[in-house]
Every structure is written in C-alpha cells, then in structure tokens.
Image (cartoon, rainbow, N blue to C red):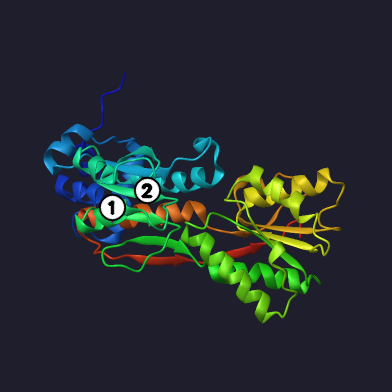
Amino acid sequence: MSAKVTIAEVAKRAGVSTMTVSRVLNNTGPVKKETAERIRAIIAELNYQPNLVARSLSSKRSMMIGIIINRVKKVFFDNYIGQIGSGITDIVQERGYRVMFFPVETDREKTSAYLDIVRSHVIDGLIILRSKTDNPHIQMLADNEVPFMLVNHKKYKKNYNFIDTENIEGTKTAMRHLYTNGHRKIAFFAGSMDETNSIDRLKAYHTAVKELRLVVNEEWVRYAEFDKQKAFEEAGKLLQCTNRPTAILASDDYMAIGAMERLQKEGLRVPQDMAVIGFDDVELASYVKPSLTTIRQPLTELGRVAAENLLNMIAGTQKSPVHKFLKLELVKRNSG
C-alpha cells in the first residue's frame, strides 16, 4: 500500500507553504486565484485526502455539513433531491468537508430539533431542502446565528439565507409557450401550499392567465402536493369537467408525469389531445414517453451555490443574509 500523501508534500510540489495549502482547503484566507487553482490541481493529481480528525481538532470544527430534508417518501429515489444533493456534495468534498443527511418532519419534531443538531457539534452548518413557510426551526437558527442555507425557499428576513430560482418568470415562460402553441384553456397542477416555490408558481399562473386573457376556470386548478399519485388522481377529476382544458402546466415534473399517465390510461394522446408541461427537469423527464417539456431548474447548480455560500459563511468570508436567484429555461421536448 502506498504511503499517505501529506499536506507538506502538496505544499512542496506547489512551491508554497503548508499554511497556504491549508487556506485553500479551508477557504480561510486570501490566496491568489492562479495559486489556488495550482494547489487544487496538485491535490487532485496526488489524491491528497485531508486528515479530518486533525483538521477538526485544529479548527474546532466538525468538517461536516448537515442536509435537512422534510421527510418524503423514498427520499433517496427522488431525482430532485438527488440532483441538489449531488451539487452540494461536489463542493463540500472539494473543500475537505463531508455531508450528513437528516430527514426531519417539522410537524412532529420538537421546535428545537434543528438547533439540537447544531448543538451536538456533529455539523458546522445546515442546508435545508423543502422547508415549509411556517417552519419555526428556521427562526430559531437565525436567532442563534447558526450558518444555514435554504434551497428553493425564499424569505426576506434578517439572517435568513436562501438560494432560489426565478419561479415566477419560469411559470410565465411556460404559459407563453403554451399560448404560442394555440392553447387558451390551460389547467394548473399546484404543489404544496406551504412551500414558497409552489405559492410563487400558482400566483404566476393566475397572473399569466390575466395577462394572456385566457379562459378562467377554477376547476382547472388542481392541488396535488408535489405527489405523482395525487396528480394521477387529480387528472382523472380534471377529465370529468364539462369544459376540458387543452393543456396542463404542473408545478413539478413528478406531477406532470402522473398527469400524463392518467391521460394515457384514459385513451388521450399527449400532446395531440392534451399538452403537458412540467417544472424542474429532473433526470426522469427526458426518459418518459413522450419526453417531458419542462422548465429547467439548475438543480445541481442550486446545490453547488448553496454549499459554496454556506462554507464561506462558516469560514467568515461571506456575511449573512444571502439572497440569490438562479435563472430558469424552457426545455422543449415532446409533451407540449
């Protein structure tokens, strides 16, 4: 077995001090961009693995980032969570950290559940996915100045940090696309009304209906909770309407796929009889038949940006609050 590469060897190869290498690893001090890039290249070439125990003792940090997920069915089979988690993992590994997942049900856990995780000294900061709008744990983190990032959840509040996407503009883009394709009767499948991205997308749908002067029918707004099976059921109810829509815009891809499956089961063709558009562009979207037209969220990039900003806050190079929005794009496939 070959000897373990040391930080001193990395420093010698790069022609810098071990302190400079340490600064690059921990993002704790100024290092010229070209020098940092050279050090990272050498770290990769030598397959240098930092001693996490030693780094924890010297920095008084755990070198661990917690990812909190509102407990969902088959969480690790969820493409949405998987792609965001992949982006987070890419960054934390580059910076010598590791990740730990914490599935939490905020309705059932005590109010201090998030804070208890931090106080256990297991993690240095938190990234929170699918948070609810009335989540009391978030305010407690902010009050205690705990480094945290919310992903796909926005709240303009002191010490609240979030990375989100332009949900309103993305929804309007999808509506304009359907309008251009001749659709004037468009249904909407809303997600969970206790998540800000779902609320924004529903509001944007109503705004687009007015701006495009489309037919208004409240029966066409179905609430499927970001759940594929519920969307399947709601699509069946939609088909019972006397005045059927000609297109469906769903607030996420899983609901869109569930709706398509119900349409096809009932003998309708997609998109000839009814067009369907999703939101997110999870990996599964390009494999279903017909392939799903959708609004692409840069899911992996969301994770990367969240991790970068959180680690910078932990290192003291980024101040709170952080409020960032990433752009969305329409991906045209075969469903609408």
Q: What residue is drawn where x is 26% and y is 40%?
A: 117
User: How far across and how far down the image is residue 106, in percent?
Assistant: 38, 45
Query: Which kind of residue does numbered mark 2 sit on?
Result: Ile
* Quarter occupied by residue 158: bottom left
Circle 1 crowding by C-alpha within 10 Å: few under 14, some 14–19, many from 20: many
User: How far across and how far down the image is residue 22, in percent?
Assistant: 19, 46
Instruction: From the image, tell me which residue sits under label 2.
Output: 91
The quadrant of the picture occupied by the N terminus is top left
Q: Earlier in the sequence, mark 2 or mark 1?
A: 2
- Residue that lies at the very extreme toward the top in this rendered image: 1
User: How far across and how far down the image is residue 51, in percent?
Assistant: 22, 33
The one of 290 and 152 positioned closer to us in this rendering: 152
Q: Are marks 2 and 1 in contact (CB under 8 Å)?
A: yes
The quadrant of the picture occupied by the C terminus is bottom right
Q: Is residue 141 left or right of residue 279?
A: left
The one of 241 and 127 positioned closer to us in this rendering: 241
Q: What residue is drawn where x is 65% and y is 46%?
A: 230
